[in-house]
Image (cartoon, grey):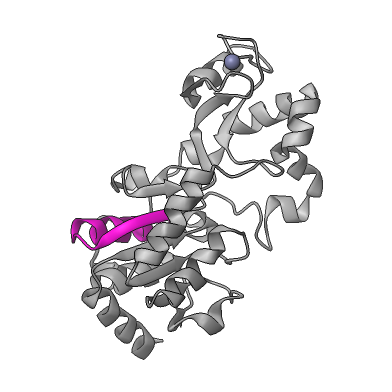
Amino acid sequence: MDDRLQTACKWVEQSRRIVALTGAGISTESGIPDFRGPQGLWTQNPKAEKLSDIRFYMADPEVRKLAWQHRVAHPAWKAKPNPGHLALVSLEQSGRLHALVTQNIDGLHQAAGNSPQKVVEVHGTMHEVVCMRCDWRGPMQETLDRVRAGEEDPACTSCGGILKSATISFGQALIAEVIDRALQAAEEADLLLAIGTSLNVYPVANAVPLAKSAGARVVIVNAEPTVMDPMADAVLRGSIGEVLPRLVQGRRTNRISTA
Ligand SMILES: [Zn+2]
């Protein structure tokens, strides 16, 4: 591990246009469960998946009521960025982070201190709500206040339409400009770091072969094997909160005071 880590460290030092692609694995260490992973809520309880399926959500007020209760109680509201997130802030501060593409909806990269302009949220954000009829958007907490005050399925105040968190649900199309921006950034990278993602959600997983074929090095940091490990120049296993600070800053986590 240490030899591979040292080699990958050198690549990080030498690179000037690094693209990080992050998935649920970086947020589990902040206490946010991985809904789709092997131990995930949805994997163990397929019924829960209905809450995030746009067809059930639009058709069934009971599904929406339950979804709002889950939003109110979501662990992300209390979650704090961990050393993995902070390592990516250091990378941006060093001037070498080209883009931070994330599959996560929790906003922890911005909370850690990455600039919003660098973060590409391919699956949207849970910090905003969107009206499914008129496209009105607003802050999630204001709508959650309405739920806490007793509205079980709050409607859009402009048009009465159905509100939903501004995330991409199952059965819902990705936003073309956002995914295009993510994949273009991958093609412009000289180093792609795939972090905490099993790389089996498309099209964002295509960032890896796109970066590779454009000449970038690829480093995968994940607790479990991924389908794209054979394509990587280095695969680093272990806790992201431990590996990433060492990879990006060339030092051990026990020296990071913010941890
Ligand atoms: Zn509306």
Q: Is residue 200 magenta?
A: no
Left or right: where 178 falls relative to 118:
right
Q: Can residue 45 be seen in this view?
A: yes
The one nearer the camera, 169 or 207, is: 207
What span is in magenta? 83-101
Q: Can residue 105 be seen in this view?
A: no
Write the residue at 48% across / 69% down: 210
Q: Return the x and y of residue 228 as percentages of the image width and height.
A: 56, 76
The one nearer the camera, 239 or 91, is: 91
Write the residue at 43% across / 84% down: 233
Residue 169 lies in quadrant: top right
Write the residue at 31% across / 86% down: 7
Residue 200 lies in quadrant: bottom right
Residue reaching furthest to the left: 94
Quarter of the render that holds ligand 1: top right
Q: Return the x and y of residue 18 as percentages of the image width and height.
A: 31, 66
Left or right: where 2 falls relative to 224:
left
